[in-house]
Amino acid sequence: MRSRHFVIAAILALLFTSNLFAQSVKITHGPYLQAVGDNEVTIVWTTSNDAISWVEIAPSGNDSFYGQEHPKYYETRNGNRVVGKLHRVNVKGLTAATEYRYRVFSKEVLTYEGHRVLYGNIASTNVYRQKPLRFRTMDRQSEELAFTVINDIHSNVDTLRSLLKDVSFEKTGLVIFNGDMVSAMNDEAQVLGGFMDAAVEMFAGEVPAFFARGNHEARGPFSVNFPEYFPTLSGHPYYSFRSGPVYFIVLDCGEDKPDSDIEYSELAQFDAYRSEQAAWLEKIVQTEEYLSAPYRLVILHIPPYGSDWHGALDLRSKMVPILNQAGITAMFSGHTHRYGFYAAGQEGNAFPLVINANNTSLEVTVNNNAMTVVHKNTKGRELHRHAFKPSK
């Protein structure tokens, strides 16, 4: 009887183990670049099953990726390697203005008890039948930069593709998502499927996308997870960075109605959050890095002018006085779903404000002479053009 029980248990264990190994791990979203700086990058992707992950980095070149062993960078937290389905590997110690090749790996974790781990298969990006993915660290010494801004597509992937179809990503330093790329953040599939998967297909594995959170990204149970999927150099959804001759300040607008509004179900605390950002902004605009930049650009989803709703008024009272004294080149906004332009001095603003619509893009080129902003529709037709001189 005992031997029969032993055989049955062995068969069940074999079936259980076989079933576990049959669950082959896959990369489900990404990889995409985030928080690219002078000397670092964060690479983000997700997998179908729990896994530990790492990135291999190689110098630029056309030689085989596996001509030699390359350094591995692991996802760790407080000394532990992270097990999960979301993977964010931060790579530090890179050289500025330098191109690198990379490959991501995720090793499936089948069981995890104490320090006993049973591993499964490995999923990775391909470097055999296609060229490895590449990225370039920021070059603050460059006198030129090209980038594109889109916003308010609300998960309309066709609009995203139309607005970006003619962009030459080989010559584009970055793309800015200026908020409301989705209508709410309810779960991972909605967020990444709503725009990021298409962005990965087009550019985001090799050209960084920088995100300014819109008011709709502040809605839904998944909204608190926003920073996990779109990490920044500051660790907050508001941050700054330098690329070429441009110093970018990216602000987080919060919601557009009062915190007490019934729509927010007692979950909003954005007035205090905007005050927190204003205190941070006052310090940023006094730094040498900011003051030495030829161009200083503010990215903010809700424009502080053109509306008497609470969000715009709060931004106007807290951010504009600081920016009016900071000599910024321009501000780019969205939110209204229609194009708008406020010249410096038009409404008490000491800087020009360009508002991009929900079905148009801003294609920006910067050189020693000017920052040129071309406003285009989904067919690539130029609608408006602005040129801004370097900040004094």
Image (tube, rainbow, N blue to C red):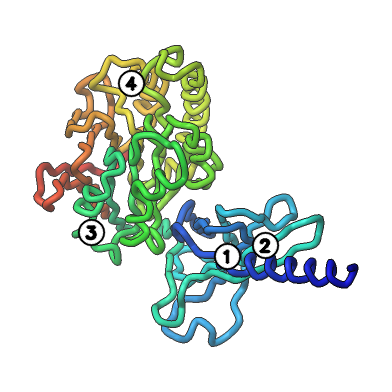
Q: Which mark is residue 23?
A: 1
Q: Which residue is mark 4?
A: 312
Q: Residue placed farthest to the front in the image?
A: 1
Q: Which residue is mark 2?
A: 110
Which comes before the other along the chain, label 2 or label 1?
1
Select label 1 or label 3 by which is in front.
1
Mark 1 and mark 3 residues within 8 Å of each other at the beta carbon: no
Crowd band around label 4 with a 10 angstrom C-alpha radius: few (<14), some (14–19), many (20+)? many
Q: Is residue 275 above or below residue 146?
A: above
Pick the front one: 238 or 93: 238
Q: Within the image, what quadrant is residue 154 found in?
A: top left
- The amino acid on which the numbered mark 4 sits, given as a three-letter code, is Ala
Q: Position of residue 351 (x, y in %)?
A: 27, 30
Which comes before the other along the chain, label 1 or label 3?
1
- Quote the CA–CA distance across marks 2 and 4: 49 Å
Select label 4 or label 1 by which is in front.
1
Which residue corresponds to the image point at 73% horizontal and 50% vertical from the top-left? 78
Q: Which mark is residue 266?
A: none
Q: Is residue 234 above or below residue 323?
A: below
Q: Which residue is mark 3?
A: 167
Q: Position of residue 173 (x, y in %)?
A: 34, 58
Mark 2 and mark 4 residues within 8 Å of each other at the beta carbon: no
Label 3, secondary structure: give it: loop
Select label 2 or label 3 by which is in front.
2
Is 22 left, or right, of 117 in this rendering?
Answer: left
Which residue corresponds to the image point at 84% horizontal and 66% vertical from the top-left? 5
Select label 2 or label 4 by which is in front.
2
Which comes before the other along the chain, label 3 or label 4?
3
